[in-house]
Amino acid sequence: GTLKRVDFSHLKSANTPAFEAKIGSQQNVSSGTQTKVSFDTEIFDTAGAYDHSTNYRFTPQTAGKYYVYLNLGVNGNGTDKLLAAHANIFKNGSVVNKHHSNYQNESIYYDTQPIFAVVDMNGSTDYIEAYGEALVNSGTPYFQPDEYSIFGAYKIIE
């Protein structure tokens, strides 16, 4: 037998649709309240599937498994210590993965909550969102903008 060369150049795949967004400016939140994060500044959005102005959600129109990542900067507002911080990835209004830090006996004023999940999406109505929470004794905590808070997802090649 002779070896045959197989040409795979016609097979193209990409990790799309994909998006990444950040918080454009500080988002004040109420202490102890689960709050949707307003990731209002798109870094990229390959299919226009991320709503960065109203619902702050990713609704890919392609079915498959998606790697979802969230990095949420939580700040007690400088003068008040954080008692707890949470980051959550939601699918269709329900939590699919969460990260929780308890700082009751620590002197922590800000933290970055990293979290990721693999989420199966139906390609028509499924959507993902990011939620967070900050607990302080007093004052107004906030989610930190720019490189401290990033939300994104991309389709995993199957």
Image (tube, grey):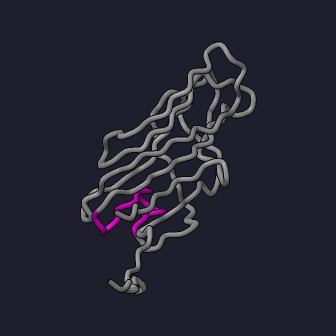
* Relative horizontal placement of residue 22, taking residue 152 as reference (left or right): right
Viewport quadrant of the N terminus: bottom left
Q: Is residue 154 left or right of residue 84?
A: left
- Residue 69 drawn in magenta: no
Image side of residue 126 versus residue 80, left or right: left
Which image quarter holds the C terminus? bottom left
Front residue (pair 67, 26): 67
Q: Residue at x 40, y 38 (%)?
A: 97
- Residue 136 in the image, given as x and y percentages of width and height: 60, 24
Q: Residue furthest top?
A: 105
Magenta-highlighted residues = 49-63
Q: Residue 139 vs residue 126: left or right?
A: right
Could you tell me residue 27's position as x and y percent?
Answer: 59, 46
For the point 29% across and 49% down, which residue is it? 92
Measured from the top left, where is residue 63 in percent x and y? 28, 64
Please tell me which residue is depicted at 43% across the width and 60% down the height of the picture.
54
Numbered-mark total: 0
Residue 77's spot in the image, x, y percent? 69, 34
Tell me if I can see residue 144 in this picture: yes
The overriding secondary structure of the stretch rendered in magenta is: loop
Q: Is residue 51 above or below residue 29?
A: below
94 in relation to 47, above or below = above
Residue situated in front as seen by the camera: 42 or 153? 153
Name the residue: 41% across, 69% down: 17
